[in-house]
Image (tube, grey):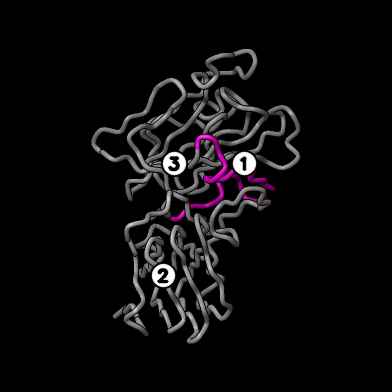
Amino acid sequence: MKNLLLATWAILIAISANAQPPFVLSTNVYRVPYANGTDVHVSRDHRIHTPSGRYDMSGRNNGSSCTSNYPIVAAAEGIVRRIVDNHNVSPPDCDPNCADFNNYVWIEHANGEWSKYSHMKQNSTSVTAGLNVGDQVCAGTLLGYECEVGQASGPHLHFEVRVPNNPANVQISTAGGFMSDAAHVIPVINSIGLHYFNANYDITASGSTACANNNLQLNLPFAINNDGVRIYLASSTVQTLAGISIIYNNGSNGMFQAGGSVTLSPGFQAMPGSNFHARIGSCATTGMAGSCQ
């Protein structure tokens, strides 16, 4: 039987005290939304994007046009719910309402989260990728190609993950594809070292199913403050070593997820106002589809 081992009663799991951080971690686990091997630069993360809660990223060395044809892929398994890809204008040609001319795809995932992919090349979703609303896609399925259509300054991908407050009545505008009455979450990424997107971060897209960190021991002290994020994923165990000071302070986000057990030894603290989770479950039951790097 899989147990959550608490070495001290002072540890608080999934703390929801008076002060709350502005964002929480996704329940689903995602991959980088570019085809494997694509070198990607994250220019803006959920903290500095305007408005907040979204991400901007692009294929590196993409120049000033859409000719590089960087493939955009689904970040997780789900069902395509919205497609608009008939537009082919960008500033200044569409001013002052460029947002109304965004090309975009929305995917609904089994856990109730939705992911959005925007500014893609005209007809690259419906024609090139051959997708229709209602199609089921896997992580890594081609959705289209990076471009700068709509409210975009240079070719890039706008990516976000949201949770509708009313799943029975999801509100998405036709023009621009903006979801209202929904919360943003920080997507947990299973194929990069940080396990989340950070501004000015260069990564190589990967969808590997290898479980590199079967057992993970945390033996270095650290403290996470404000809107900081620290995530650890392992297929078998995550363990903090006794006496190692690990602190999630007020306003921080964190998660330990393992297939077998999570052990929090003396020295670990999740302070009131932090948003820390310990999750246990096999890869298959946590939406990780066998990928638990």
Residue range in magenta is 29-51
Image position, residue 10 (x, y; %):
34, 79
Tell me the distance, in whole angstroms, between the alpha carbons under discs 1 and 2.
31 Å
As drawn, 252 above or below 171: below
The amino acid beneath tag 2 is Ala
Image position, residue 132 (x, y; %):
42, 30
Q: Is residue 128 magenta?
A: no
> Residue extending furthest left?
168
> How many marks on residues?
3
Question: Mark 3 = which residue?
Answer: 115
Question: Mark 1 = which residue?
Answer: 57
Question: Mark 2 = which residue?
Answer: 270
Image position, residue 251 (x, y; %):
44, 57
Instruction: Indicate the secondary structure of the residue bearing disc 2.
Output: strand
As drawn, 235 above or below 128: below
Mark in the foreground, 1 or 2: 2
Name the image quarter holding the N terminus. bottom left
Labels 2 and 3 touching (C-beta < 8 A): no
